[in-house]
Image: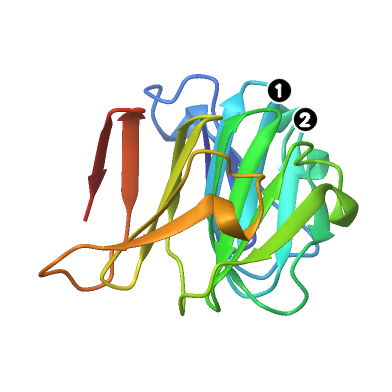
């Protein structure tokens, strides 16, 4: 298990083992890690909510020194990240941009920016490479082809809601948003 808070990353191979089962360290080059996604034991990707950085580790259990940081979105903070597999991660920002990558630890050139056009996105869930869902003001944003550019993303208002703060999809047919 991997958790992030501020500039720190917490790792445990025995998450129910109590406080002594967790190690932590500071990741250099980030300001506020606020979301993390680990599609396998050999890849974790975290987003920096204050700057446009993505931190990634191909050996997350090796501690903070195993993490590399890449600026993928300039100075615009990222609002979340989700990975369906080691070959698909998405992130969003607070200005309506979506970023996708088929090589999430590949640095800036590996991330494609698409302007979807809403004011902000919140946390994401990608239960498969064929579906990613994120929160948006008064609704959700979805894509069946997350690396497909602007036309691949749809913003869907949900009547009677404020901003969707979090989304979790257990499968491609069951998502819960709050």
Q: Quadrant of residue 12?
A: top right
Residue receiving disc 2? 58
Q: Residue at x 64, y 61 (%)?
A: 7
Can the viewer see residue 4 in this picture? no
The answer to which quarter of the image holds residue 166 is bottom left
Picture layout, residue 38 above or below residue 158: above
Residue shown at 37%/23% (left/top)?
A: 16
Q: With respect to residue 100, does 95 lie above or below? A: below
Question: Which residue is outermost to the front?
Answer: 151
Tag 1: Cα neighbours inside 10 Å, few (<14), some, or many (≥20)? few
The disc at residue 42 is 1
Q: Is residue 9 left or right of residue 164?
A: right
Q: Position of residue 34 (x, y in %)?
A: 52, 60
Give residue 79's position: percent from left, percent from top. 52, 65
SS label for mark 1: loop
- Residue, x 89% and y 53% (percent of image)? 109
- Contact? badges 2 and 1 (CB < 8 Å): yes
Q: Secondary structure at mark 2?
A: loop
Q: x and y percent of residue 41 in the render?
A: 63, 21
Rounded to the nearest angstrom, the CA distance separating label 2 from label 1 is: 5 Å
Dot 2 alpha-carbon crowd within 10 angstroms: few under 14, some 14 to 19, many 20 or more: some
Q: Is residue 153 visible?
A: yes
Q: Quadrant of the C terminus?
A: bottom left
Q: Nearer the viewer, residue 11 or 56?
A: 56
Which residue: 10% across, 70% down?
Answer: 160
């Amino acid at each position: 298990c991997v958790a992030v808070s501020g500039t720190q990353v917490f790792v445990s191979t025995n998450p129910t083992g109590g406080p002594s089962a967790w190690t932590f360290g500071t990741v250099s080059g980030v300001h506020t890690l606020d979301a993390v996604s680990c599609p396998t034991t050999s890849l974790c990707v975290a987003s920096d909510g204050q700057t446009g950085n993505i931190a990634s580790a191909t050996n997350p259990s090796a501690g903070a020194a195993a993490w590399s940081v890449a600026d993928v979105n300039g100075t615009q903070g990222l609002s979340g990240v989700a990975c369906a597999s080691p070959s698909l991660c998405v992130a969003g920002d607070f200005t309506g941009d979506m970023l996708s990558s088929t090589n999430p630890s590949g640095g800036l050139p590996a991330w494609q920016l698409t302007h979807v056009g809403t004011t902000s996105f919140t946390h994401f869930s990608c239960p498969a490479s064929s579906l990613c869902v994120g929160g948006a003001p008064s609704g959700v944003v979805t894509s069946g082809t997350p690396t497909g550019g602007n036309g691949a993303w749809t913003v869907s208002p949900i009547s009677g809601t404020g901003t969707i703060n979090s989304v979790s999809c257990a499968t491609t047919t069951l998502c819960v948003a709050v």
